[in-house]
Image: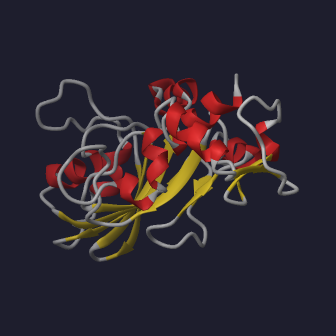
Amino acid sequence: MKLVKHIANLGYGSRKQVQWLFREGRVTDADGEVLYADDAVPPACVRIDGEPLDPPPGLLLMLHKPVGVTCSTKDAGRLVYDLLPPRYRLRDPVLSTVGRLDRETSGLLLLTDDGQLLHRIIAPKAKLPKVYVATLAEDLRGDEAALFAAGTLLLDGEKTPLLPAELEVLGPRRARLTLHEGRYHQVRRMFAAVGNHVEALHRERVGGLTLGDLPEGQWRALGDEDRARLFTPG
């Protein structure tokens, strides 16, 4: 792939705009030597305004999503893409969220431009555990763990029972819930089914990945070790 097209696909601008970057001398190699549009240089050696190019296609990001931010490209209000460099919206292939966290849920969100990886993560057969901490409006009544683990709970409007899920009591109104599937608003609907209401919800783990010390609203690209950890829940 020609360098101009590669840089354009990373979202730095249209091909015409990228051509102007070259003409203005803003595209250099690692030693600061100005590059030309027809130079054959490995992308890893290219700098724009002195900064390395963004990762190539196959990107996987972890984002610490705050409350009040929507997993969408065009809904009203703040979007998860507003937390990323603006050019990330323009990447080709498109950078998509891996599943969704609703507007009022915080925590670990994955994004990728790799369609095969996305489907591998969300595929039902993967059964990657997703761990949430819920703060509830009412005290736990005591039988929730057994009910959620039974594999017989049927959510309102559905015909297939939920897979067994593990509940750990953290306090009278606080619990950690581990799911092995991803249905619409599942955690909120599970607690609604037992007469409770989720006041706050935070996802702390997907597969073997946790947020670690990643601050709220921040993101980082994931490497090979992270990807391996994702599919090794432990």
Q: Position of residue 140 (x, y in %)?
A: 24, 68
How many circles with numbers are drawn on the protein?
0
Q: Which quarter of the rendered picture does the N terminus lie within?
A: top right
Left or right: 210, with 162 as reference point: right
Left or right: 164, with 24 as reference point: left
User: In the picture shown, does residue 145 fall above or below 153?
Assistant: below
Task: Identify the image's colour scheme: rainbow, by chain, secondary structure or one colour.
Answer: secondary structure
Farthest residue, direction front: 23
| Image-quadrant location for residue 43 | top right
Q: Nearer the viewer, residue 219 or 4?
A: 4
Residue 147 seen by the camera: no
Q: Where is residue 141 in the image (x, y as percent from the top left)?
A: 21, 66
The residue sitting at 78% across, 43% down in the picture is: 35
User: In the picture shown, does residue 179 fall above or below 67?
Assistant: above
Q: Which of 135 and 61 is in front in this view?
A: 61
Farthest residue, direction right: 31
Residue 181 seen by the camera: yes
Q: Where is residue 11 in the image (x, y as percent from the top left)?
A: 51, 41
User: In the picture shown, does residue 140 fall above or below 129?
Assistant: below
Farthest residue, direction bottom: 171
Q: Position of residue 96 (x, y in %)?
A: 43, 38
The residue sitting at 63% across, 52% down in the picture is: 221
Q: Which of 149 and 83 is in front in this view?
A: 83
Left or right: 31, with 90 as reference point: right
